[in-house]
Amino acid sequence: MIAFLKEVLGLRVEVVRYIRRTAGLHIVGTDLQVRVSEHLGDERVAAILKRLLKNPQKARQTVLSTA
């Protein structure tokens, strides 16, 4: 299992896995929830978080392409 970043852009990161096939980034207070399908691999989730650090707009495109 991959260790995910604990904080991104000053927001505490929480990875939430659920049944739906779509993925999304949600800011709730000071938390960044990375909501992903339970079938999405840890490597793909880590790639989304790394891309978010480099360019927030590209992270959005990455999340949308996982659907």
Image (spheres, rainbow, N blue to C red):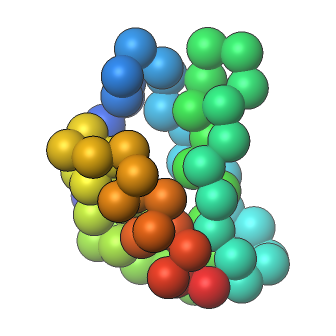
Res. 62 in view: yes
Residue 28 as seen in the image, left or right of residue 9: right
Res. 4 in view: no
Q: Quadrant of the N terminus?
A: bottom left
Residue 66 image offset from top left, x and y in percent: 52, 82
Tally of marks? 0
Residue 21 image offset from top left, x and y in percent: 71, 83
Relative to 44, say whether 25 is above or below: above
* Residue visible at 66% across and 31% down in the picture: 27
* Residue visible at 79% across and 77% down in the picture: 19
Q: Residue furthest front?
A: 57
Relative to 22, say whether 5 is above or below: above
* Residue visible at 41% across and 78% down in the picture: 41
Residue 27 as seen in the image, left or right of residue 4: right
Residue 11 image offset from top left, x and y in percent: 48, 20
Relative to 22, say whether 16 is above or below: above
Residue nearest the observer in this picture, 28 or 42: 28
Residue 12 image offset from top left, x and y in percent: 49, 22
Residue 51 as seen in the image, left or right of residue 13: left
Q: Residue furthest right?
A: 20
The image quarter in which residue 23 lies: bottom right
Q: Quadrant of the C terminus?
A: bottom right
Residue nearest the observer in this picture, 49 or 43: 49
The image quarter in which residue 44 lies: bottom left
* Residue visible at 56% across and 74% down in the picture: 64
